[in-house]
Image (cartoon, rainbow, N blue to C red):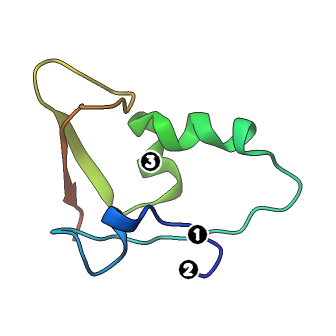
Amino acid sequence: MSDIRWPEKYLPGTTDNYVSNEVIVAGLTSAQVWPYLNDTTHWPMYYKNASEIGFEDGAGPELAEGVHFRLNSAR
């Protein structure tokens, strides 16, 4: 986690929920990676414990400011 620069109000341990699943990718830019992080339909392809991702108010599958979603982890 030392490579993550957290905004102060989101520091791990200071929020209701905290999840960290880090992968270091060499040779890719944030612009190349962001579409896979922002579009929740991709999540189960690279993280098998991400399932049943649901959005409120007809939003999604992309994340956006103010959008609320829920995640049920596969067991």
- Secondary-structure class at tag 1: loop
Q: Which amino acid does label 1 sit on?
A: Ile
What is the CA distance from the residue labelled 1 to the residue labelled 2? Answer: 5 Å
Residue placed at 16% from the left, 17% from the top? 58
Quarter of the view holding residue 1: bottom right
Q: Is residue 5 left or right of residue 9?
A: right
Q: In this view, does 25 lie above or below 57?
A: below
Q: What residue type is labelled 2?
A: Met
Q: Is residue 54 left or right of residue 1?
A: left
Tell which circle, 2 or 3, labels the residue nearer the N-terminal end.
2
Residue placed at 39% from the left, 67% from the top? 8
- Secondary-structure class at tag 3: helix
Q: Residue 5, position in %: x, y?
A: 57, 67
Identify residue for label 2.
1
Front in this rendered view, residue 40 or 51: 40
What is the CA distance from the residue labelled 3 to the residue labelled 1? Answer: 20 Å
Q: Which amino acid does label 3 sit on?
A: Trp
Graded by Cα atoms within 10 Å as few (under 14), some (14 to 19) or many (20 or more), the crowding at tag 2 reads few
Identify residue for label 1.
4
